[in-house]
Image: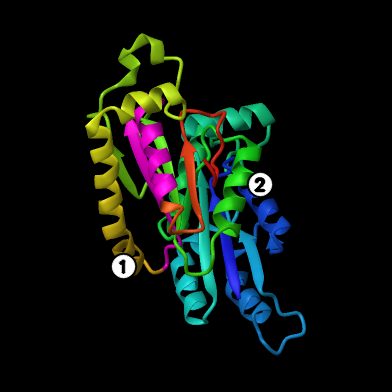
Amino acid sequence: MKLIIVSGRSGSGKSTALHVLEDLGYYCIDNLPIGLLFPLTREAADQSAPGRLDKMAVSIDARNLSAELANFEEIYRKLRKADIQVEIIYLDADEQSLLQRFHATRRKHPLSDDKTSLREAISSEKDLLEPLSKLSDLYINTKGLSMYELRDMVKQRVAGRKDQELALLFQSFGFKHGVPLDSDYVFDVRCLPNPYWDTSLRKFTGIDQPVIEFLEKESASHKMVNDLIAFLESWIPSFADSNRNRSYMTISIGCTGGQHRSVYICEQLGRHFREHSSNVQVRHTELPHLQARKEV
């Protein structure tokens, strides 16, 4: 049986992710007490049981008792020993984004009370959920993602992945906005010639033909792409072998603003690796009008 555990801080999009999995045919349970996870899953996976399930997804969050959350790693090991295929999807966002979402919805944080402010609750929740975050197979930073973009990302990364296949996400970003927290590899391409300094190119991005032509005239651009392909083709298999529980890999490419060079390099890498894998996506963090996608 395949079990997907959805976790993350309140306001990060867990309910949205769980609804996507339900649409994909998973039997979903929201806010399951951790103490029930192993007996429930074992019973659902019983070959002789009339109600046997092939796919189940559960949401686990800070509404669980802190002692149960601290004991999660032991339960996780028991699940794997029981031959249950477990994947953990952990959703999060920066503190300011979570604060804005709670203020917008006017909902009460599950950990806030008369003595605990919203900011304090958000901060303490991160510590409580660390046992799940450190074991996560897929970490999604939902900052800047709309509900629809998050739905598409979960659907593509989970449903589009074949069993035992490593799903790849190439994402561009701008260093001046910070390095994405969900990165497995981070590469800096600020050494390439910058189209920004050509005033006629500033209004374009790395997916537009004028910028593509500018960068393709530079031999450094071709060398960068070829070197990254060689490195990744050499080391991705080792990454997969040494992290057998990992089903997803996020490769972040950064330039100064995340508009030109990193976007172009991500597109080139995505195009190459799609020839060898059925689940390769490209996402441009600083171009919110472009969703994570499987096709260029």
Whether residue 147 is visible here, answered yes or no, is yes
Residue at 60 percent of width and 31 percent of height? 101
Q: Which amino acid type corresponds to the residue marked 1 in the rendered image?
A: Ser
- For the point 39% across and 23% down, which residue is it? 211
Pointer 1 or 2: first along the chain: 2
Residue 177 image position (x, y, % from top left): 38, 27
Specify start and end residues of the magenta stretch as a single range. 245-272
- One can see residue 175 in this view: no
CA distance for labels 1 and 2: 31 Å
Instruction: Tell me which residue sits at (42%, 63%) in the image.
Output: 246
Left or right side of 41 for 119: left
Who is closer to the viewer here, 52 or 263? 263
Q: How is the image coloured?
A: rainbow
Picture layout, residue 122 above or below residue 198: below
**In this orientation, which residue lies closer to the viewer: 119 or 56?**
56
Please provide percent x and percent y for residue 254: 33, 34
> Residue 162 occupies which quadrant of the picture?
bottom right
The dot on residue 242 is 1
- The residue pinned by badge 2 equals 16
Amino acid type shown at disc 2 = Thr
